Amino acid sequence: MTKTERIKAAIDGKRPDMIPYSLWSHFPGVDMDPVRLAEHTWEFYKKLNVDFIKTMSNGMYAIEDLGCEIDYSEVAKGGVAKVTHTPVSEVDDWNSVPAAHIGKGALARELASLELLLERLRREGEDVPVVFTVFSPLTTADKLSGKRLLRHIAEGGGGAVHAALDRITESTCALARRAVELGAAGVFLASQMSGYDVMGEALYREYGVPYDLRVLQASGGWFNALHAHGDNILFGVLKDYPVHALNWHVWESPPDPDEGHDLAAKCIMGGIKRMDVTNRNKNAVRSQIYRTVKALDGAGLILTPGCVIRHPLDEEMLAFVRQAKDDVEQALFARSDID
């Protein structure tokens, strides 16, 4: 099977010739240069031989063109980027949030890097799907406001927030649509707000779901994935999203993978605790892979971390993930039994 065939089989709920897997991280500093980002992504892919590539943009690219100032200095040390200045500090500021243009600034940079990567893959004859990272409109709005979004809604600013979300969604839809036009297999829609402990079901249904669905509809890809970040996710809401794969912090936040697969009837993307990779907990990682593969009988599964692998990256540990997957597969499935 090619990598594309392998991913399509997993999406269809089958067990392919080998269980597909992938890993992803950030490239601090490099990710501000589309040429270098494409080259580093290519090298990451070739070293680890993953079955799909998730674009590895910086986590704040969606708000760069909206007037924010961002400190990325902690990312390379294992930390996260921080917003040091935002144009949205008061409720009325939401009325001034513009719709970013995909033809300039950070959005154009990300599309340019995607295009370079896709050209390299085609030139080298690599049949591997690429999913383009976009953030849910609500996640972008929360980052843009320096985490003031929920407070502003509570203060009566819901109407202004909805209007800003509409403009953010317009930009995100255009971005997703263009990424697929360039050759991406779909989008990796990352939501950092879809948790009971973040805002609850009623608020997410009002401020999250309608805008997420617009982005997914705009994509039109054959491999759209939803990433639900954090603990205690709103699985009852997210399981019905029109995506091909669900990604969350499996083994850290319920449900377990077999429960998620049965209730959502979708391919499960996950199974590895990302911090156990960072902390070189080999026994834990192997155990997670075993339990995940066993729970799903290797079918309808794309083995991945629940989120981005933090820095500093350990190449030997990243390679171990693939080896552990292969070892578990060999132990559980005789080759003649694999579909």
Image (tube, rainbow, N blue to C red):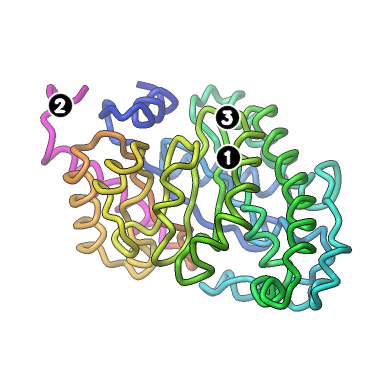
In screen coordinates, is 331 left or right of 150? left
Q: Is residue 265 above or below residue 142?
A: above
Q: Amino acid at mark 3?
A: Gly
User: Which quadrant of the structure image shows residue 12?
Assistant: top left
Q: Residues in magenta? A: 314-339
Q: Is residue 316 above or below residue 336?
A: below
To which quarter of the image does residue 74 belong?
bottom right
Q: Secondary structure at mark 2?
A: helix
Near mark 2 (Cα within 10 A), the count class, few <14, some 14-19 or many ≥20, is: few
Residue type pointed to by label 2? Arg
Residue 322 colored magenta?
yes
> Mark 1 vs mark 3: which is more N-terminal?
1
Q: Residue at x 86, y 63 (%)?
A: 95
For the N terminus, the image quarter is top left
Residue 290 position, x and y percent, is 19, 50
**Residue behind mark 2:** 335
For label 1, the residue is 187
If you read the primary sequence from the N terminus, does the residue marked by circle 2 or circle 3 appear first? Answer: 3
Distance between the alpha carbons at the discs numbered 2 and 3 = 32 Å
Q: Residue at horizontal 47%, vertical 39%?
A: 46
Question: How far, Cα to Cα, is label 2 from label 1?
Answer: 32 Å
Q: Nearer the viewer, mark 2 or mark 1?
A: 1
Residue 8 coordinates in the image, percent (x, y): 40, 26
Report the disc number at residue 221: 3
Q: Position of residue 36 (x, y in %)?
A: 68, 49
Disc 1 residue type? Val
Is residue 274 rendered to the left or right of residue 102? left
